[in-house]
Amino acid sequence: MSVERQTEPEKQAAFEQWPDGVSFGVLRDLIGYALRRAQIAIYRDFFASVGADGITPPLFAALVLIAENPDINQSRLGEILGVNRAAAKALVDRLTAPKLVERQASPSDRRANTIRLTPEGQARLGDLIRQVQAHDARVARRLAPEDLSLLRDLLGRF
């Protein structure tokens, strides 16, 4: 009998999507509830894989967007992420504290800040991308490539 080695994220207690012996009633029919249960499973693996340094999925997304859009306006970053101005400011604050990003006054609007990665942020993002890609492959391992493509298409319709 062979013993399959588990990675660190897999060693944690598994999250059961739909545990036996539990009646979910109408919840089983609600797409939003199914998406939320899937999100919980995915976030658990993310935090076990990547979250040791305090990086969350929204912080990772913000880092990628800032890297891909240098000098993005803080308000625009919030709009893209689907969060309000206060939440966008809090996200950027959490990235400026460890010196991953820096704010600069916008040359076109003194009331606004633009954001860009610092050299430390650029170096850290490369490592994070590799970790998140490994996490993503792990959580999607039960889906065939055509299923993943369909899932991305369906989620994009929301």
Image (cartoon, helix red, strand yellow):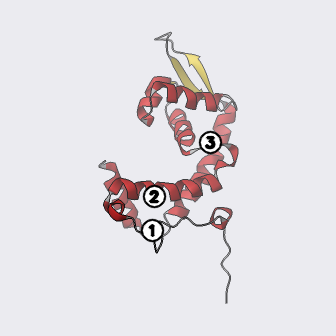
Q: Which residue is mark 2?
A: 37
Badge 2 amino acid = Arg
Instruction: Classify mark 1: residues with Cα within 10 Å, few (<14), some (14-19) or many (20+).
Output: few
Decide: is 158 above or below 8.
above
Decide: is 29 above or below 120.
below
Nearer the N terminus, badge 2 or badge 1? 1
Contact (Cβ within 8 Å) of mark 3 with mark 2: no
Q: Is residue 103 left or right of residue 25?
A: right
Badge 3 amino acid = Leu
Q: Which residue is mark 1?
A: 18
Q: CA distance from mark 2 to mark 1?
A: 9 Å
Residue 47 visible in image:
yes
At which x and y percent is residue 93? Answer: 61, 27
Disc 1, SS = loop
Disc 3, SS = helix
Q: CA distance from mark 3 to mark 2?
A: 28 Å
At which x and y percent is residue 86? Answer: 50, 25
Q: CA distance from mark 3 to mark 1?
A: 35 Å
Badge 1 amino acid = Trp
Disc 2, SS = helix
Instruction: Classify mark 2: residues with Cα within 10 Å, few (<14), some (14-19) or many (20+).
Output: some
Q: Which residue is mark 3?
A: 125
Task: Give whichever of 124, 44 is nearer the camera.
Answer: 44
Foreground disc of the pair 3, 1:
1
Foreground disc of the pair 3, 2:
2
At which x and y percent is residue 31? Answer: 33, 56
Residue 70 visible in image:
no
**Which residue appears at 62% of the width and 52% of the height?**
47
